[in-house]
Image: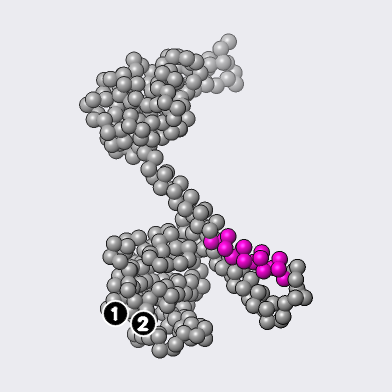
Amino acid sequence: MSVGTSSARGARQVPRPPAPRTPGDLADLGIDPDQLPDGLVVADEHGRVVCFNAAAVRITATPAAEALGRPLDSALPLEDLEGRRWWQLTDPYGGLAIRVGQPERNLLLPGGREVLVTARYVRTERLGPVHRVVVTLRDTEARRRTERSHAELIATVAHELRSPLTSVKGFTATLLAKWERFTDDQKRLMLETVDADADRVTRLIAELLDISRIDSGRLEVRRQPVDIGAAVGRHIQAYVAAGQSADRFLLRLAQPLPDLWADPDKVDQVLSNLLENAVRHGEGTVTIDVTPTASPREGEDTGTSVTVSDEGAGIPEESMNRVFTRFWRGSKRGGTGLGLYIVKGIVEAHGGTITVGRAPGGGAEFRFTLPVAAPAYLS
């Protein structure tokens, strides 16, 4: 007796799996192919193109009217990176009946433009003839930008690590080999240099970890009460202790300031970077204004704004929109070019905003605003 018969004791009806959906069913789902973010090309059982959506038109620069009704290999003439015609090579309608498609790979359109192509062979029954060939196209530009960014990051890290590690290795090897030949002052100078270079490596590693957390959305903010005026004052005192003139800094605190709840370590990191930029790359008086302002976050009334400005040459107008991107150093700027990118990530993780402009004295002006973010039990 058949397993599928309901009269058999203990037997159950085995449901047949649903037929695979094809792009022809998109209308049944209320989806317009032109709304899809990726290029979609569909050929029928005869190899004729029956769907060529707006994204496919954009990626291939072929009008839909020219593609529809044409053979797939003519409407979408793809070649692999070795110059072989892709559809002749893969033969979707012939060959083995167990094939289900082609995995994503880089292929070339006429003119040499690269696209990422994935193909799916749709059959109405197992091992039956191909009923549809569904092809998705993706532009490689976004991936290329990501790959270039990663390559730049690796090159920057390698360059920034090489110099301090070479110094550390050189001084430690010299001290170990010729310890007795150096005076105490010479030894101290070498060890201080090693210590400074070790700090430089530590900062770079910390920056890389911050970038990783920012890019993945995992930057944690541990909110505590922050006295922003006192935090700025500590940074100014540190610069004065390091030899800067106290007259170079002007701190202006508007009163009263709202109670600010933020991550004190990360706020210190933002202040440290902005003040270092003003001191190192700016000129004249470094002015820090701390004022209450409207909150950048919807549903909150008040926020705290900090403006750091100098009287130097400032940032060229054409560079303003690139200041907070990775590796921006501007002219004659040192460092990794990652600091302001991290600053923007920290401020935005707090729900705040940061802008750059020209200061009244002609230099650069950075302004960041944080919502007070008071806990619910205090409101």
Image position of 316 with respect to 218: above or below: below
Expressed as whole percent of the image width and height from the top left, the position of residue 110 reads 33, 29
Question: Which residue lies most toward the top here?
Answer: 1
Q: Using residue 201 as the reference point, say whether residue 70 is left or right of it.
A: left
- Label the magenta part by its dominant secondary structure: helix
Residue type for callout 1: Gly
3D distance between C-alphas at marks 2 and 1: 9 Å
Question: Which quadrant, please, contains the N terminus?
Answer: top right
Within-10-Å neighbours for mark 1: few <14, some 14–19, many 20+: some
Question: Which residue lies most toward the left here?
Answer: 65
User: Residues in magenta?
Assistant: 160-175
Residue type for callout 2: Gly
- Residue 15 in view, yes or no: yes
Front-lying residue, 164 or 251: 164
Front-lying residue, 17 or 247: 247
Expressed as whole percent of the image width and height from the top left, the position of residue 251 reads 38, 85
Q: Using residue 198 as the reference point, say whether residue 289 is left or right of it.
A: left
Q: Are marks 2 and 1 in contact (CB under 8 Å)?
A: yes
Question: Which residue lies most toward the front here?
Answer: 181
Within-10-Å neighbours for mark 2: few <14, some 14–19, many 20+: some
Quarter of the rendering containing residue 341:
bottom left
- Label ID, residue 361: 1
Quarter of the rendering containing residue 71:
top left
Quarter of the rendering containing residue 297:
bottom left
Name the residue: 53% across, 15% down.
5
Question: Which quadrant, please, contains the C terminus?
Answer: bottom left
The residue tagged 2 is 284
Q: Secondary structure at mark 1?
A: loop
